[in-house]
Amino acid sequence: MLTSNWLLFLAAVVAAQDATETFEPEDTVVPTSFEPPAATPTGEPCARIYALASEDTNIPAASAQACLNSVPVDVSGDEKLIDELKLLWDLHSEVGELNRLPDFFGPDASYDVMAELDNIKSKLSEYESEYAVQVAIQDLVTKSRNYHWNYVPDILQIFNFWRDHQIVAISSDGTALPNLYLREDAEALASDDDANVSEIIRINDQDAWDFLKTVGNNEQYIDEDGRLMAMLYKGDTTTNGSFWRIERYDGDSTVYEFADGTFLTSDNYAWTNEDFSDISSGSDFLNKFCNGSYIESQRELKKRGMSGLSRRGQMPNKYTSPLDKRGVIPNTTDSAFPRAVIQSEYGGVAGYFLEGDGYDDIAVLKAITFDPEGDADNENIEFRTTIRNFLTRCQEENKQKLIVDVRENGGGATGLLLNMFSQIFPDFIPFSAQRYRASEAFAKIGETLEQLDFNKFTDDEILTLAYNYSFWDYSSLTTPQGEDWKDWAEFAGPWVSNGVNYTNEYRYNYTRKGYDIASGNQTIFDASNVVMFTDSLCGSACASFHEEMKNVAGVKSVVVGGYPRTGPMQALTGTKGGTVNPFYSWRDTGKELSEFLESKNLDVDPAITNLGNIDQVVKRAGDGSSRLQIEDQLRKGDTSGTPLQYIYEAADCRIFYTLETYADATNAWKAVWDAFSDDSNCVEGSTKHESSVSGGFKPFGAGDVTDAQIPNSGGDGNGNGNGNGNGNEKDDKKSAASRFGGSGALAALTFAVVAAML
């Protein structure tokens, strides 16, 4: 059992939990014109890149791809890499569910990731290039459709591919099936009904929508509607979308065919910030970029809070990916948003009042992220204060109705999502349930820590242990009923599903510093007068917020977008998982614990030793871009223990963007309220799906759960579902200890129990 000292020290760790840390590309400039490169030099493909790349020159996409295809396979290194990935990925919380994915993931979606890795390993000598090997491995992660699980090795970071155009989907009235347009054509139509433009009907000699489904397979959103929304240009926030920022090489050009019979051919480009002056072959590329030094340099940049993704030259407007989810709400006078009643300095949250007949009593709270950019302490305080002040203004102005706009919200900090929910509904205590995958390595670390006698260690030693091992601090967690865990064995279980061990379901201890649950305040809006506005891209901490709003408060949702068809659409298709951490942190966890135990002449379990020896993984993918998820999020009252990731959740209503709404936030909000108030404004067949509140889903509500309402070991995990979040504090050890009387034996946070939902 953990000693009281250990629990006390770990309690200090959890006190620091709240903010997250992410790293985003620096703002870049859109070229006003394109300068085609000079004639392509002859010789080795990688030798050509130096001559092609310059500050104002774009590399032909085919030239960059030819270079990548010329890099020879590192057979011995990749064999070791795959063995280590199997060990590491055993920690991923969903790896035991991938062989039985639900039908809505698509036909033949299920797979055995470990067997697939073995298959790649057995055929390494048959691959034509190192690039092909690494793409094959990345595909295993991509098709999980969980953007908390990433594999971005060195060779896949050297070039960025992009097209010359963005695309949008526009409906004539919000319910008619949309057509596809180039961004500039949609803007021309919006300003002039008689503009001589036409919709796109084919791309690269394929039906345009089918083409997007194929390209969208490189996205990690749960279904194809979500993947489409990730690809489209966002008119109000001006996010370019991943059709423009190509995930993979997609030919040297893109050919658009329009309904009026005209064609447009546009070159595709690549871009790099790396120095190719000493690269004359694919082997040189492998030796320079795939030997660990490149990844180490990127990791150091990120540790200093700098972007490892910035590039020299003119990379067009940055694309916000799930790894870079710090969206900012525009607030300039020429933006698509009206003047805010109040807006946070860091742009993460803002409040608005609608005007006009029938809209005067409607307020809008927009949260584009739960991870605003800025100083960790200040950004979180300001985020909460902005919401509090806005709700006060709503009360003063007698606003009766609320739209909560979470479009493009990719996640963020637990403390912020829970605080936002509790400020909107102060009478409700959020539930936020989760579990760890109790893999062999995870369980052995917990058992080892449980058996240590911390009375024999120095304060500094305890400080270091607490700093690195707070995932295993069950004292910072509670049972689903809110009680303390008695010991590690009670917490760890295991709870078994599909032959896989998990810890028992748990919740965060809201009495700990950092959560700031706003109970006791006056409720301003009745849940029946509140609607969530989504574009299906909501995920991570945003998915947790949606879960509290839907299953605890009973709030309905309206979703915008998706493919041109009638019927329902999921409110959210971003990840619904929990704690996520980079690969390298797990190597450090195993290595440092092994060294500590050996220094005390204590036995080290092989599972811990092996985890500390995944050096090839860290060499090739150890910069923070490659991550895994160790925590599932669970639904309050769902006895099957089905992760939220695998529960289908249709919105209560679906609409499409129009020329009037896709680039005008006010018009979009009015359209949402009209649809929420009157089903006739919804897409045909999109209302009253059984998984929606209006279709029969019964929210659990704010009451406590009983033993009969939590998962029991042995469940099949296939329930339909009738928590979440994560935070991560940036404080160092000294500052955390100082908050608790300055005792040198108190710890701060490297791994947060509630880690960053990135």
Image (cartoon, rainbow, N blue to C red):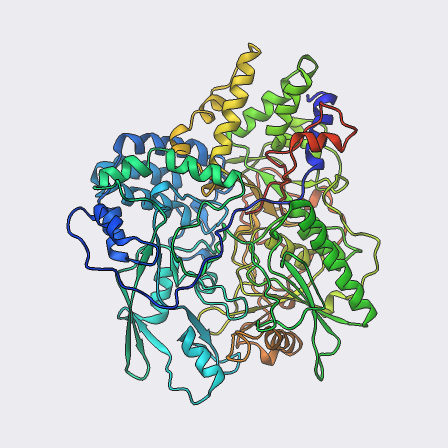
**Is residue 72 at least partly visible in the picture?**
no
Quarter of the view holding residue 7: top right
- Please say if 53 is above or below 97: below
Asked if residue 110 lies left or right of residue 75, the reply is: right
Q: Residue lying farthest bottom?
A: 194
Which residue is depicted at the point 50% across and 43% down? 94
Q: Where the N terminus falls, by quadrant? A: top right
Q: Residue lying farthest top?
A: 601
Which residue is depicted at the point 33% across and 82% down? 259
Position in image of residue 82 (x %, y %): 35, 34
Which residue is depicted at the point 69% across and 76% down? 354
**Is residue 484 at least partly visible in the picture?**
yes
Asked if residue 681 lies left or right of residue 419, the reply is: left
Position in image of residue 327 (x %, y %): 56, 58
Quarter of the view holding residue 123: top left
Position in image of residue 44 (x %, y %): 18, 46
Which residue is depicted at the point 27% across and 63% down? 36
